[in-house]
Amino acid sequence: MARLILSKRDVAEKQLDTAVRLFFQDEDPVSTHTLAAAAHDILEVLTRGVRDFDILSEVSLIKPEKKKEVIKIFKKAQNFFKHASRDVSKTIKFAPFHTEAILFDCVRMYIHLTKQKTPEVHAYHMWFIMRYPQYFNYLYDPNNPLFKMFVSVRRSGLNPKNLKGFHDVLTLLRRSGKFPMPCP
């Protein structure tokens, strides 16, 4: 195999896209989480100073005295999966929702950084807002393009609890040739 010349952004994009594909295939939650967390670490550094939103480690809704605790919860699985030298005989109770949240944060940072979407980023963004609509104000603004996408996908009968259906959407998006898609 030929050597690859990759920027940190290239690496984060590849890790994020692969994590999203694994997520929709519902294959391996440990590998999915590990890739998502690695992409998150890179994107967090690349967006430092240029982002205008809170990321997991800077969530303004969390009480200042609880931030370290929240970060520890989200980093627990990542550190367990990555470091073998600590607590060799320990086990972990892993909550896959943490992966969902980390992937969504990655998607937000990636879009903010690149001003575009890969098919994987687009599909995951669509899935997340459909899966958790109660958290998003823009889903109720008819002038917002995401509102139109949300309504269209809902009308199609696609269920966000059906990961296979979103994997099929991702396959169609990848074949469309319309990506990377610019974002406003």
Image (spheres, rainbow, N blue to C red):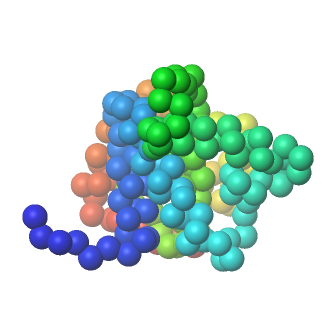
Left or right, residue 134 beside residue 3: right
Whether residue 169 is visible? no
Q: Position of residue 4 (x, y in %)?
A: 22, 72
Q: Position of residue 117 (x, y in %)?
A: 45, 63
Q: Position of residue 145 (x, y in %)?
A: 59, 59
Q: Above or below — where is 180 with respect to 167?
A: below
**Image quadrant containing the N terminus:** bottom left
Vertical relation: 179 (above or below) 86: below
Q: Nearer the viewer, residue 169 or 92?
A: 92
Q: Is residue 27 left or right of residue 121?
A: left
On the image, which quarter does residue 48 sit in? bottom right
The residue at 42%/32% (across/down) is 29
Q: Residue 180 falls in which quadrant of the image?
A: bottom left
Where's the C terminus, which quadrant?
bottom right
Left or right of 161, for residue 176:
left
Please state the total of marks drawn on the protein image: 0
Residue drawn at 24 percent across, 55 percent down = 175
Give me the residue at 44% from left, 38% from top.
Answer: 84
Q: Quadrant of residue 95?
A: top right
Q: Residue at x 38, y 65 (%)?
A: 11
User: Residue 109, relative to residue 73: is it above or below?
Assistant: below
Q: Nearer the viewer, residue 56 or 151?
A: 56
Q: Residue furthest left?
A: 1
Foreground pick, 22 / 58: 58
